[in-house]
Amino acid sequence: MNASIITIGDEILIGQIIDTNSSYIAKALDKIGVSINEMLSISDEKQHILNTLKQLQNKVDLVIITGGLGPTKDDITKKTFCKYFEDELVENDSVLLHVKEIIEGFYKRPITQINRDQALVPSKATVLFNKVGTAPGMWIKKENTVYVSLPGVPYEMKYLVDEVIVPKLISEYNRASIVHKTIMTYGRGESLIAEQIEDWEDNLPEHIKLAYLPSPGKVRLRLSSKGFDEKVLNEEIDFQVQKLHEIIGEIIIGTENDQPIENVVSDLLRKENRTLAVAESCTGGRIAQLLTAIPGASVFFKGGVVCYATESKINVLGVSEDLISMHSVVSKQVAESMATQAKKIFKSDYAIATTGNAGPEKGDSDVEVGTVFIAFATPNGVFSEEFNFGQPREKVTGRAVNKGFEILYKEILKKE
Amino acid sequence: MNASIITIGDEILIGQIIDTNSSYIAKALDKIGVSINEMLSISDEKQHILNTLKQLQNKVDLVIITGGLGPTKDDITKKTFCKYFEDELVENDSVLLHVKEIIEGFYKRPITQINRDQALVPSKATVLFNKVGTAPGMWIKKENTVYVSLPGVPYEMKYLVDEVIVPKLISEYNRASIVHKTIMTYGRGESLIAEQIEDWEDNLPEHIKLAYLPSPGKVRLRLSSKGFDEKVLNEEIDFQVQKLHEIIGEIIIGTENDQPIENVVSDLLRKENRTLAVAESCTGGRIAQLLTAIPGASVFFKGGVVCYATESKINVLGVSEDLISMHSVVSKQVAESMATQAKKIFKSDYAIATTGNAGPEKGDSDVEVGTVFIAFATPNGVFSEEFNFGQPREKVTGRAVNKGFEILYKEILKKE
C-alpha cells in the first residue's frame, strides 16, 4: 500500500509556518507498512486543490490531506471535496451534538452558525469522529484511491491518525512490512564514517538501503528494508547492525529506533535510578526543555537553572564571584563550579553545566565566538571539556546540547 | 516570478525528520516577491527526482532543490543533475581549495577522496560558493526554468539562500511585490473572531486575502496582497488593519510582520529598559529557551529556574515548604511565591512563574490534568491566573507559554 500526503494552506507556502503534520502522518503510516511516495504542500485555492486530487487519482492507494477544515471562510476543503466527488454537504447529527457539547459545555457560550456549520460533511464521506475538536475528518473512496481529509490543528490530526485511521487501515487493508533501524553515532563526521564503513556498505544486500543523517555533533545511520516477512527483515538488519558495531562500535551510542539522545539518557537514568540537574548558560534552557518534554520526567530530572546573566551564576547558583573575575565567565573553572553547584542545590546524582559564547557577537567574555565549556558533576567528582562549535548560533547551542548528553551517557555507563 | 521547492530525502518521507528548509526558503523568496506554487518532498531515487524535475520544467520560473549533496553514497543529486541536463561532473578548483581548508585547516586531518569529490560539479552549473560547508550549491538554467540545488544541512542552506541566491535574484530578475501583514490576537477563539469581523471580511477588496492561523491560545490573522506598487499595497493593507483594530482592538497584541510573541515581549522589555526572570515548573524551560534563542537576550533576560521537582521549588527557589503542604504544589499561592522568589533571586523587574499539571497523568498534585497557574511578579506586586488548557501535554505547555507572554505584555504596557 502506498500513499501521498497533501498539506493545504498558503501559510506554509509563504513560510509562515512549518508543516509538521506530514511528518507525523508519514511516521505513523510507515510504521504499519504504508510507503509514502510524496508529500505536497499546496495553496488553498480551489483549482489547485482539484488539480492535485486529480493528479493523484489511481496513482496511489491513499491520499491524506490536512488543513482547510476550520470554521472560517478561508477553509475550503469540504466545498472542494463536494466538487471533486460530485457530492453535497449534509448535516451530521452526532457531529452537531459533539460541537454543541464543546461550545456550550466547555466554552460556556451559545453555539453560532459558524460552529454549527462544522457539522456539515459531504454525503458520500465516512465521518471520522474528532473527539478533541469541532472539525470531523472525512474518508471517501473514488475508484482505486481513498481520500482522507483531516483538520490541520496538530493535536486534532494526531488524535484522528492514531485512534481512527491507523486502526482502520490495519483492519481493512493488506500492507507490507517496513523495517528501519537507526544507529546513532556521536562525535565523528559523516565523511570519515563513510570511509570507514565503505566495504561494509558496498556489500549490503540490494534490498537493504543505507542513509546518512548528519546533524550538529551526531550522524544517524538508517538501515531500511521492505517485504512481507517482518521477522526475516529484522534478522537481516540486525545482522548488518552487528557488523557495523564491529567497525565503528566506539562511536555508536544506541540502536533504538530513532530515539533522540535525551530519551536514551533518560531511559538510562531511570534504569540506574539516578537523577540529573542542569545549569545552562549558553544553551539557555534547551537541555531542560528537551528533558521535561518527556512524560514522567520528574522521576529523573530534578530541575535546572538558566543562569544567562553573569550575576545569576553568582546569586542563584552560588558560583564564586572571585572565580569568575579570575578565570572569566566562559572558562573551565566556572563551568565546573556551575555543575558542582547545580548538583548540590538540586540534590541530584549528576549535573550538566554549559557556559560559552553562542554568538553572533562576543558577550560578557573575551573568548572566541563558538567556544563552549561543558562540565559534568558526577558521584565521583567533576570534569569538563572545551569545544569550539563554530557558527551560527543555532549550531553552537545544538551541538552543545548533543555533546552534553553524549558525554553524560558515556559517563553513566562507565559507572555501572 | 514563481517557484517550486523540492526536498529530496527518504528521511522526510518516513517521518524521521521534519522538513524545515522549505519553509525557510519560501519565506526568503516570498519577501522578495517570488510566489511559491508548491512544495514537494520526494524520495532519493534517481527516477523519482528526474520525473519531478521534468514535471516542473517550464511550469515555474525557479525550482529550488535541497538535499542529496553530501559526501556519502546516498547523495545522488549531482549525478541526477548530470543526467537531466545531459552534463558531466568536473572538478572545481576553488571549491577544492575551500574543502581542503576546512578539512585540513579546521578539522586537522588529511583530505580523503570522499572529501575531494565534494568539489565535483556539473560543467554547465554556476557554482554557488558555500562558505560554511563543503558542498557547493549549483544553478543551472534549462529553457524557461532555473534549477538551483542546495545542501540540506540547514545552516548551509540558509547561508546560500541569504548571501547568494536572494541577492542574485534581486539583481537579475524582475519580481512583483508581495505584502503580508499578520495581526496577532490572543485569548479569543477563531470562530468567535470570525463572527465579529464577518462584515469587514465580506467587504475586503477582491485582491486582499485573509487567512486565519489558530494555535493554542492565539489566532493570527494574515492579510496578503500582490502587485507591482509596494507602497499602494501597504497603504491598502494598513487601512484594513486600522478597521480591524476598531472591531477587535482589545485582543490585538501586535501587528508586526509575524513576530512571535516572545520577540514582541523582548522588544518591549528592551524599550522600557526592564528585565525578566522565570520560574518554570510545568513549562519546563520552554519560556527561557524561547527568550535565549533571541540574540542579545542577556540585556533583558536575567535567567530562570526550571523547578520541576517539588523539592527544587523549596531548595532552589526558596518557596516555603509549609505553603506547599498547605495549598498543594499546583496552586495560586505557590505560583505567586515562585514568581516573587524568582524576581528576588534574579534581581529582575518582572518574573513569570508556571506550575501545573501538563498530563498525561496526575503528578505531585491532585488538580485536574491541564490545570495551570501562571503568576507574575511586577514592580507593583504579584498576581496570578488559573487556567485549564485541556490535553494533550504539548497543548497545555504551548498555551501556558503563550498565555504567560500575553499577560506579561499587557502588564508591562499598563505600567507605561
Image (cartoon, coloured by chain):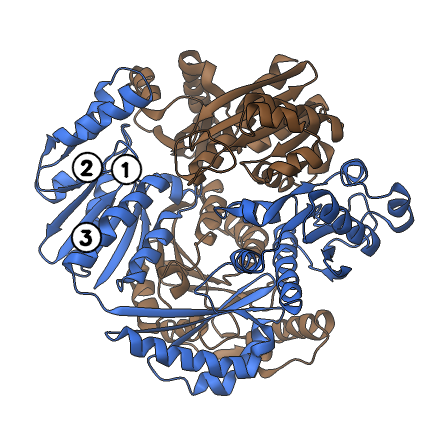
Chain colours: A brown, B blue
Chain letter of disc 3? B
The type of residue carrying mark 1 is Gly
Task: Classify residue B63 as left or right of residue B309.
Answer: left
Q: Residues within 10 Å of mark 2 (few under 14, many from 20)?
A: many
Task: Classify residue A1 as left or right of residue A194.
Answer: right
Q: Nearer the viewer, residue B267 or B24?
A: B267
Horizontal and vertical percent for residue B285?
Answer: 63, 44
Q: In the figure, B47 relative to B177: above or below?
A: above
Q: Marks 1 and 3: in contact by CB < 8 Å?
A: no
Q: Is residue A335 visible?
A: no
Residue drawn 22% across and 44% down?
Answer: B149
Task: Classify residue B103 as left or right of residue A134.
Answer: left
Residue B68 circle label: 1
Q: Closer to the N terminus: mark 2 or mark 3?
A: 2
The quarter of the picture where residue B67 lies is top left
Residue B78 circle label: 2
Q: Nearer the viewer, residue B118 or A49?
A: B118
Q: Residues within 10 Å of mark 3 (few under 14, many from 20)?
A: few
Q: CA distance from mark 2 to mark 3?
A: 22 Å
Q: Marks 2 and 1: in contact by CB < 8 Å?
A: yes
